[in-house]
C-alpha cells in the first residue's frame, strides 16, 4: 500500500501529530502541527516525501503551535476551519491559561474550511472533512475511507471524550458531533485521536462510558 501513517506524540500535553505519506506521489499531509516543528519536518524528510498540506483539527495551542515554523520550513499551505480563526489568532496568549507565558504566532491559514463536508486530495491521500464542534469552535475530524481511519482530534478518545470546559466548549454540542459525525462510521474504523492511543469506533461504541445510551 502506498499510504503510510506515522503518529508522533510530542509536547508537554502529549499531543498526537500525524504524517500521512503517499510513496507513489511522494507527497505528504500533516495533521495537527504541534509544538516541535524540527521533529515534524525531519519525519517528513525521512519519509522521502514533500509536505504538500498541513491541516489542523482545531486551534488550541497544543495542536497548532508549530504551524508558522513548519510553514516557513516547507512552504506547505495550512488549512483550518473558519470558526477556529479567532482562537488561532489568540495563540500567543493562549498559553497564559496554563501558565506558559507568551507563545509564538500561528501561521496564517491559506484556506478556511467550512462546515460542509468535502474531500481533500493529495496524491492518493483522500481526506473527508467532518465538522465536529463541541470541544472547540471550528473543530474538524478527517476521515480516510480507503484506509478506514478517522483523525478525530479532541472529540473522541480511547475511553473518553474531549473536555468542554475551555473556550468554545459545549458538552451537548460535542455529544451531537460524536453521534452524527463519528458514530455513523463503521465499527472497524480506527480512531486516531489528538491524545492517547489508537482505538476503534466499535470499541468506543461498546465500552466508552460517555457514550452509554447513544
Image (tube, rainbow, N blue to C red):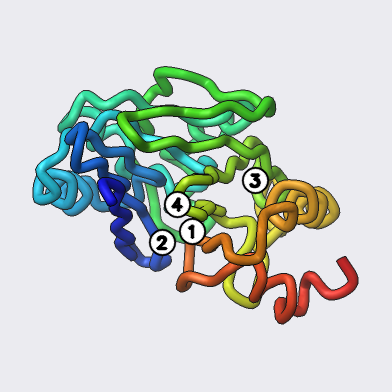
Q: CA distance from mark 1 to mark 4?
A: 18 Å
Q: Quadrant of residue 77?
A: top left
Q: CA distance from mark 2 to mark 3?
A: 16 Å
Helix, strand or loop under label 4: loop
Q: Residue at x 84, y 75 (%)?
A: 212
Q: Which residue is disc 2 drawn over?
A: 15
Q: Which residue is disc 1 drawn over?
A: 194
What percent of the width, then of the height, locates residue 96? 48, 52
Q: Quadrant of residue 188?
A: bottom right
Labels 2 and 1 touching (C-beta < 8 A): yes
Q: Which residue is disc 3 drawn over?
A: 136
- The image quadrant where one finds the C terminus is bottom right
Q: Earlier in the sequence, mark 1 or mark 3?
A: 3
Specify the label residue 147 is tagged with: 4
Q: Earlier in the sequence, mark 2 or mark 4?
A: 2
Q: CA distance from mark 2 to mark 1?
A: 6 Å
As drawn, 76 above or below 70: above
Q: Earlier in the sequence, mark 2 or mark 3?
A: 2
Of the residues tagged 2 and 4, which is closer to the observer?
4
Q: Residue at x 46, y 19 (%)?
A: 111
Amino acid at each position: 500500500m502506498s499510504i503510510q501513517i506515522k503518529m508522533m506524540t510530542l509536547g508537554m500535553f502529549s499531543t498526537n501529530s500525524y504524517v500521512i505519506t503517499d510513496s507513489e506521489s511522494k507527497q505528504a499531509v500533516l495533521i495537527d502541527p504541534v509544538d516541535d516543528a524540527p521533529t515534524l519536518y525531519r519525519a517528513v524528510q525521512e519519509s522521502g516525501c514533500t509536505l504538500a498540506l498541513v491541516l489542523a483539527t482545531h486551534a488550541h495551542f497544543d495542536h497548532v503551535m508549530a504551524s508558522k515554523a513548519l510553514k516557513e520550513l516547507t512552504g506547505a499551505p495550512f488549512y483550518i476551519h473558519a470558526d477556529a480563526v479567532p482562537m488561532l489568532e489568540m495563540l500567543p496568549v493562549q498559553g497564559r491559561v496554563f501558565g506558559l507565558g507568551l507563545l509564538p504566532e500561528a501561521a496564517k491559514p491559506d484556506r478556511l474550511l467550512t462546515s460542509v463536508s468535502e474531500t481533500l486530495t493529495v496524491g492518493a491521500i483522500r481526506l473527508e472533512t467532518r465538522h465536529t464542534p463541541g470541544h472547540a469552535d471550528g473543530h474538524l475530524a478527517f476521515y480516510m475511507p480507503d484506509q478506514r481511519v478517522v483523525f478525530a482530534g479532541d472529540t473522541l478518545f480511547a475511553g473518553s471524550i474531549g473536555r468542554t470546559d475551555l473556550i468554545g466548549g459545549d458538552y451537548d454540542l460535542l455529544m451531537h458531533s460524536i453521534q452524527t459525525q463519528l458514530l455513523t462510521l463503521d465499527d472497524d474504523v480506527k480512531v486516531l485521536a489528538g491524545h492517547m492511543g489508537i482505538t476503534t469506533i466499535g470499541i468506543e461504541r461498546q465500552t466508552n462510558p460517555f457514550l452509554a445510551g447513544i
